[in-house]
Amino acid sequence: MDAGEVARALTRIAHEILEKNKGIKDLALVGIRTGGVHLAHRLAKRIAEIEPGTVPLGELDITLYRDDLGLRKDQPILKKTTIPFNISGLKVVLVDDVLFTGRTIRAAMDGLIDLGRPAEIQLAVLVDRGHRQLPIKANYIGKNLPTARDENIQVFLEEEGEDDRVVVLNGGQT
Amino acid sequence: MSLKRKDLTSIASLSADEIRLILETADSFKEVSGREIKKVPALRGKTVVNFFFEPSTRTRTSFELAAKRLSADVINFSPSSSSVVKGETLLDTARNIEAMQADLIVLRHPAAGAAESLARGVKSSVINAGDGWHEHPTQALLDLFTLREKQREFKGLRVAIVGDLAHSRVARSNIYALTKLGAEVRAVGPPTMIPAGLDRLGAKISYNLDEALHGVDVIMMLRLQLERQGRALFPSIREYANLYGLTAERLKLAEPGALVMHPGPINRGVEIAPEVADSFSSVILDQVTNGVAVRMGVLYLLSGAGA
């Protein structure tokens, strides 16, 4: 995907979110660190261009909810969860860059539910690369990108000082 | 980077980057303590043993709370209720605890170096919660965390540590930690309470509190250990309070906005006047709150499977 495709995918997802939820009432966006946070900010901006009002935006770090914490040699670096609003009763759209095994999303849902009881959790991703290990499905998908198990998907974003693009790296690099 | 060590036994052995990593990590845990459900599953299935050979309320409770907020199982173990009174050695007792699959051991012990020697003898991670007059690393870390939270820049920060530095593990850990991060430390107390060689740790020595307070940004008061009073380190508590007690008058000698810290428990009217302890300058209760976040950070970082 190049910069234009990324931009058009996000614009479409913004419209889909509004269409499915009939506007921005009780809607909230929560980006999963780090890539998902940038994308959530972009979606919020696009939504604001379409409908009046603002959608609350949060940032979620799922590290403490990972299912491989006890298996790793070194603990991963923690980043901060910043969700400055009560999620109870809201329709929360989780935003991430790549949907792969589904384990991150499982962790994110557990993390969210510890913060309150959302009315609904939906999922928006820029890329769905398949190979799910858990029964998880996205509501909004930028692009389906069939991959081999050992390939790597890398999402580059402007916020990290790169040109927007999604690339598939050859296998054996995992 | 990550913390590539099994144990936390001293600040002296930490690099400035490792200290910063622990403070960063603690910052994320502070948010957890502010939630309605103050619990995350990070240490689910791990066992933390609080192994305390000296009385402690604050530190033990703080570690216990930290471990519980990480979903670990916690066992409190103190010598009066254990086979230690039957003559078992520290290492043997610890090996028995380890045989019950304890993942982390939090040790407080009256002998300097106890945590270090235990760490060498067991596979579990060992956290020093105070060893004799040596170190109390998590106290220094929570002090630093509190300063950072109050937007104090460590580089060039002027800190006075006042009181019985000879018998203070808190002071020693803080001198190491603050100087590693670029702060300037003044050690203040009566000559009988300033050990020889303290200047070699990078602290400037002063015997006059009024002089030493000029221009300081932070004042750390140490507890006057009244139980050591029989040792003739000073003529009377009243004289000590007059010369080295922090009063509202004295506080004015420091920089405007200077912070007052104390590791607790405080002796009101001895080393610190009640109106200072309860003033806006005092961050004593912030220190206690932050202690839990810092200990969560340390427990988390040391709990990797490779540890």
Image (tube, helix red, strand yellow):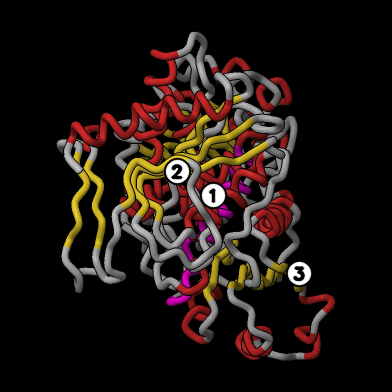
The quadrant of the image that shows the C terminus of chain B is: bottom left
Locate residue A17 relative to residue B273 in the image: left or right: left
Seen from the viewer's position, the closer of residues A111 and A168 is A168
- In the rendered image, which quarter is residue A34 located in? top left
Task: Tell me the subunit letter for badge 3.
Answer: B
Q: Position of residue A92 (x, y in %)?
A: 58, 34
Q: Which residue is mark 3?
A: B76
Q: Mark 3 and mark 1: span between their CA atoms?
A: 33 Å
Q: Quadrant of the N terminus of chain B?
A: bottom left
B253 w.r.t. B187: above or below: above
Residue B88: x %, y % from top left: 71, 91
Q: For the point 59% across and 33% down, which residue is it?
A: B244
* Local crowd size for mark 2, using a 10 Å CA cut-off: few (<14), some (14–19), many (≥20): many
Vertical relation: A139 (above or below) B60:
above
2 or 3: mark nearer the eye: 2
> What is the span of residues highlighted in magenta in the rendered image?
B287-306
Other-residue count near label 1 (Cα within 10 Å), few / some / many at <14 / 14–19 / ≥20: many
Up-down: is A43 above or below A34?
above
